[in-house]
Image (spheres, rainbow, N blue to C red):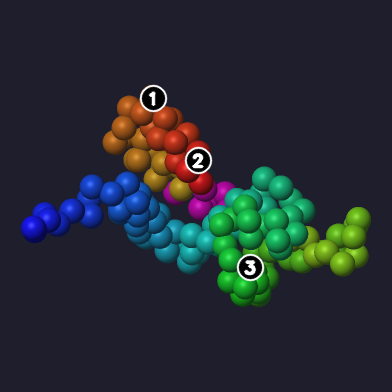
C-alpha cells in the first residue's frame, strides 16, 4: 500500500513559517538601511513602551533568548542606543533605557516598520488583517 506524500503547504506550521520568513526578510531589508537588525528594533520598541525593563522582562517581550539579548544589548550600549541603570527599587536589578540617540533612531525606524505594516494590510482587507493579527497573537 502506497501513500501519497503530503505537501508541506498543507500544514499550518509551514504556512506560518513561510509567512514569517517573507515578512522578516522584507523588514530586514528595510531596517538594513538604518544599520539595525530586527531584534534591536524590537528592543528599542519595547523600551519606548516601558522605559524601565529588566533584562529578563525585555527578553520575554522582545522574543529574544536571554544570552542573545545580553550580547545585543552590549552592542547597543556601545553604539549609544541604550544604557543600563541600577533599579531604584532593587539594587540587584539593572534596567535598560533608550538614550536620546536611541529614541531618535527608533522613531526613524518605526516609520519603515509602519510602512511595512501598511503594505501587509494592503494585501488583506482591514477586517481580515485585524482577524489575522488576533489569531496570530492567540497562537503566540
Mark 2 lies on residue? 137
**Disc 3 element:** helix
Measure how far apart labels 2 and 3 are at the Cα level: 22 Å
Identified at 71% across, 47% down, the residue is 50
Magenta span: helix, strand or loop, mainly?
A: helix
Q: Is residue 117 magenta?
A: no
- Picture layout, residue 123 above or below residue 103: above
* Mark sitting on residue 43: none
Disc 2 or 3, which lies upstream in sequence? 3
Sequence order check: which comes first, mark 1 or mark 2?
A: 1
Circle 1 is placed at which residue position?
127
> Mark 3 = which residue?
66
Alpha carbon distance from label 1 to label 2: 15 Å
Q: Nearer the viewer, mark 1 or mark 3?
A: 3
Q: Which residues are magenta?
A: 104-112
Q: Tell me if 138 is positioned left or right of 85 in this view.
A: left
Task: Say whether residue 75 is left or right of residue 29.
Answer: right
Residue at the spot 51% in from the left edge and 46% down from the top edge: 140
Q: Residue furthest front?
A: 1
Amino acid at each position: 500500500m502506497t501513500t501519497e506524500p503530503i505537501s508541506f503547504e498543507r500544514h499550518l506550521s509551514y504556512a506560518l513559517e513561510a509567512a514569517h520568513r517573507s515578512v522578516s526578510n522584507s523588514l530586514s531589508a528595510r531596517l538594513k538601511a538604518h544599520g539595525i537588525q530586527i531584534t534591536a528594533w524590537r528592543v528599542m520598541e519595547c523600551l519606548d513602551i516601558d522605559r524601565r525593563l529588566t533584562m529578563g522582562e525585555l527578553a520575554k517581550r522582545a522574543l529574544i533568548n536571554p544570552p542573545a539579548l545580553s550580547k545585543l544589548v552590549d552592542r547597543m550600549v556601545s553604539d549609544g542606543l541604550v544604557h543600563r541603570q541600577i533599579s531604584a527599587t532593587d539594587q540587584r536589578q539593572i534596567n535598560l533605557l533608550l538614550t536620546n540617540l536611541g529614541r531618535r533612531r527608533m522613531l526613524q525606524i518605526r516609520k519603515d516598520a509602519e510602512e511595512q505594516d501598511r503594505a501587509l494590510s494592503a494585501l488583506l482587507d482591514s477586517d481580515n488583517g485585524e482577524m489575522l493579527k488576533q489569531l496570530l497573537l492567540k497562537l503566540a
